[in-house]
Amino acid sequence: MIGAELFPNGIARYLIGGLFIGGGASLIYLSTGIIAGASTFLESTLSYVSNVPRFNRLPYVSSRDWRVVFTLGIVLGAGVYAVLWQGGAWTTDVQWWRLLGGGVLVGVGTRLGKGCTSGHGVCGVGSLSSTSIVNVATFMAVAIGTAQLVQALGVSP
Amino acid sequence: MSDRGPAFYLSILVGGLIFGFGLAYSHMARPEIVLDFLQFEDLGLLFVMGGAAVVTAIVFTVATNFLNDAPLTGEEYVRRVKSFDRNVVVGGVVFGAGWGLSGICPGAAYASVGIGNWPILWAVAGMFLGAYAQGLLRSRLTDSSAGPATAD
């Protein structure tokens, strides 16, 4: 296969997975008109426990219930894969401080930038939105630079 | 708000199931695979985002041009177009740094919980901390809600 060194695991699982991701977003869109993203859940869910005005604006409070259901669906769907294909649980070796620190930056960046890999990356790019294309190009470039820098510093995993 | 009954929530749940299954099947729920992509060791993730975006592009195009309203809500079909401002770029930079450091993004993190990856709870906790911190700061900086509400 061409580019075997760039695609050591082939492309089938990636493409099939991507089609499922697009399919799930499309089912929600076609039935409800809702453009689903994954990161708004972080803020809308905080409205259950926080009085900070930012989290209690109408779009968040009115969508927080279905966002919880959507997120539960994501967890369960991945669980189906884990049981039927993965043969049980899988755990990462990436160090806890990378997950925690990266998570904080992801929490800040996705909410400041109005979306994440699903909202901007899948739905926004699928909408040919220039805002989303700029955001995706930005986070891709910075992520590649960051990951390569961390690797060069000898941090592994 | 439109009345939202069982059919609405079932549709969201099933959509989430398919979405989450795709994240797990594509291995995007594994930080190592994302880091391999960002380090140019396995470019397979191009087909994940690409494949997903092609599907939504087709569906959004067909729906906005040829279909009336969403059956379960009566909502009009629209494209996802957010207003552009400086935050779109600043947020992209901060998110990119976090994605590159951890190999995790929101949807993939939820899916990672589903594949039994308990250490990912560090990332989930971090994301909530980050989302809370920026919300608190932005609410302090402005008494009224800044700009149009975003939902993605």
Image (spheres, rainbow, N blue to C red):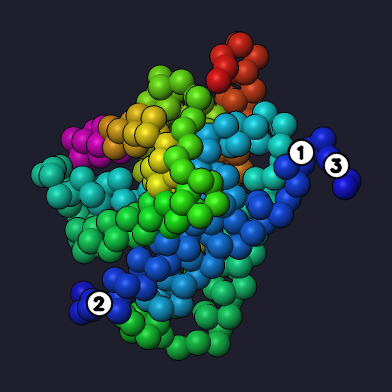
Q: Residue B3 carries which label?
A: none
Pointer 1 indicates a residue of which chain? Answer: A
Can residue A130 be spotted in the picture? no
The amino acid type of the residue labelled 2 equals: Pro
Give the residue at mark 2.
B6
The amino acid type of the residue labelled 3 equals: Gly
| Residue B16, placed above or below residue A46 | below
What segment carries the magenta color? B131-142
> Alpha-carbon distance for marks 2 and 3?
48 Å
The residue that appears at 40% across and 75% down in the rendered structure is A33
The residue that appears at 57% across and 17% down in the rendered structure is A156
Pointer 2 indicates a residue of which chain? Answer: B
Q: How many labels does the image show?
A: 3
Secondary structure at badge 2 equals helix
Give the residue at mark 1.
A8
Left-right relation of A46 to A14: left
- Is A94 one of the magenta-colored residues? no
The residue that appears at 73% across and 42% down in the rendered structure is A9
Give the residue at mark 3.
A3
Q: Main secondary structure of the magenta part?
A: helix
Q: Are labels 2 and 3 on one chain?
A: no
Left-right relation of A37 to B101: left
> Alpha-carbon distance for marks 2 and 1?
44 Å
Q: Position of residue A131 (x, y in %)?
A: 53, 53
In the picture, which quadrant includes the C terminus of chain B?
A: bottom left
The amino acid type of the residue labelled 1 equals: Pro
Please name whichever residue, A105 or A14, is drawn nearer the observer in this view of the structure: A14
- Is B137 one of the magenta-colored residues? yes
